Structure formats: C-alpha cells, structure tokens
Image (cartoon, rainbow, N blue to C red):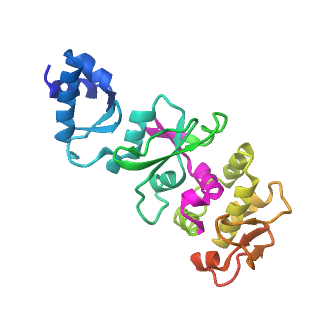
Amino acid sequence: MQPLDIINQLAQRSETFAFADFATIHGGPSPAAANALRGLVRKGIVDRVSRGAYVIRPIGRLGTGAATEDIALVVGARFADTPHRIAYSTALDIHGLLTRPLNDIQLATVGLVEMIKLGGRPFHSIVESAATIHIGAIDAGYNARISDIERSMIDAARRIDLAGGVSVLGDALSRLGPGNYDPARVVDYASKLRAPGPLRRLGSIARATGHNALADAAATARRHRHRIGVDPRVSTEDGWVDPEFKVIWAQEQLDELGLERAPG
C-alpha cells in the first residue's frame, strides 16, 4: 500500500498514530515502513512528535509544525495513555492569558519524563502525584488534558518561577478580567492541593490588580501568621508586607505591576 493511502486510512481513526500502526498497515519489513514514514515527515505531511509518536498535518497547514499550531495535538499523540496535564505557563498561554508568546511546553506528569523536546519545542516535565494530577484538569482535545483557568491560577501562584514572575500572573489576571472565572473554585482547588501559601500569594496579587472577589474568597481560607514572599526567588529584605495576607512584596515587584503604592 502506498504511504499516502496508509495516512488516509489512519486519518479516519485519529489525527495521531504510532509507528506500529503505520507498520502494520504498510505490511512490509520495519525498515521499509520506517523509510516510507520518514519520507512523509520530510514532505511535511506528518510530524514526528517523539520517538514512535506521529501526528497527521491538516491540509492547508503543511510546512508548519504541529506544535506551533496545536500543542494539545502533540501532547495527545505522546501522552494520551499517560496521566498528564498541560500546566503552568503553557496552560496560561493556551487560555490566552499571556502577553508574550510562549515557546516551551510545560506538562505535569506523574513520573519524570526524560525528554527535552516535544514536537520540536523545548519540553519540561513537572512531577506531580497521582492524587492531584487530574484536579482541575479538563479536555484539551486529541486525548490531551489541560489545567482549567482556576487550576492554572493556583499553579502559577505555587510555582512563580514556571509562570514567569509576579508580573506575568498579574497580567494574566488583568487579561482575564473579573467575572470570567469562579473564585470559590480557586479556593477549593487550593484546599484539595494543600496550597494555602499559593492561595495567599494569589489573594495578594488579586487585591493589587482589582480582583476583589478572588481576594475576598482567598481571605476566607485558613490563615497563617508567618510571612511569605510573593515570589520566593526575590529577596524580601526591607519589603512591604501586605497586612491582609502577610505576603511580602519587594519594591521591584510593586514596580512590575505598575503600583505606585502598596496593594490594599
């Protein structure tokens, strides 16, 4: 059978396939099937996502990498049978909450994945437990899962480094706008994830950016007396303490959000 006929047959099942699927239909020795598949990759008809995993390029998009067009497509091709969640900056990007385009693919997985690229883009695997991997995960298409908006916010506050900094989370809240998410769900996720610190950070940032419903919801959660930094990576010596959430802001972080005075 001709390679394009095989692709047409595979496309009737799914946009993604494994080398074993192609080789089975090809019917020839594995080296012959591999050569035929490599030819389709060179022509841009299919993309190799990772070892043994491929996606079929939509007509009209040939020549453009699948990861550029749809991250969920390449994630589904590689991780459909593995517990995962598109998360952190990648989730914020897909939800349209980042000002600048993102190149990395950040994925929460139950076990560490030894891979540096996925679909030609830099890939980072963040290990989570099986008990939390699916909290706040929704369907992203192509058998891929992604953090919903509320989980994305908690994730970003939990790992400011992966989010890109306080200003990125502040910008995300500004682009999202109040009323386009459920503050109670954010608090519920923080409780299930045992993440009171990230919720306090998020509450402080929310208050600073005018998301008072979210800040009010965060303020009703369990409180802690010890102080934490709004970004653990930044020195908080001589910083301003948000009295409501006991979160310390360095002056540079206030400057990042364009705040002339401290939030609250």
**Residue drawn at 61 percent across, 60 percent down:** 160
Task: Tell how many labels.
Answer: 0
Q: To which quarter of the image does residue 39 belong? A: top left
Furthest residue in direction bottom, as rendered? 260
Membership of 258 in magenta stretch: no
Q: Is residue 143 visible?
A: no
Query: Compared with residue 57, is residue 36 higher up or lower down, i.e. above or below?
Result: above
Which residue is farthest right?
225
- Image height of 42 relative to 187, above or below: above
Locate the C terminus and report the quarter of the image it occupies: bottom right
User: Residue at left 27%, top 29%?
Assistant: 11
Q: Is residue 258 left or right of residue 194?
A: left
x, y (%) of residue 140?
46, 41
Confirm whether residue 151 shows in the render.
yes
Give the magenta part as a residue range: 138-166
Residue 79 location (% of width, % of height): 45, 34
Horizontal arrangement in the rendering, residue 160 relative to residue 124 (left or right): right
- Picture residue at 67% right of the left edge, 55% below the top: 183
Pick out the residue farthest to the left.
Answer: 2
Residue 252, picture quadrant: bottom right
Seen in the picture, residue 156 relative to 255 is either above or below; the reply is: above
> In this image, 45 relative to 258: left or right?
left
Report x, y in % for residue 245. Answer: 78, 66
Would you place residue 28 above or below residue 210 in this image?
A: above
Residue 165 part of the magenta-drawn span: yes
Give the quarter of the image for residue 162. bottom right
Residue placed at 61% from the left, 49% from the top? 151
Q: Quadrant of the N terminus?
A: top left
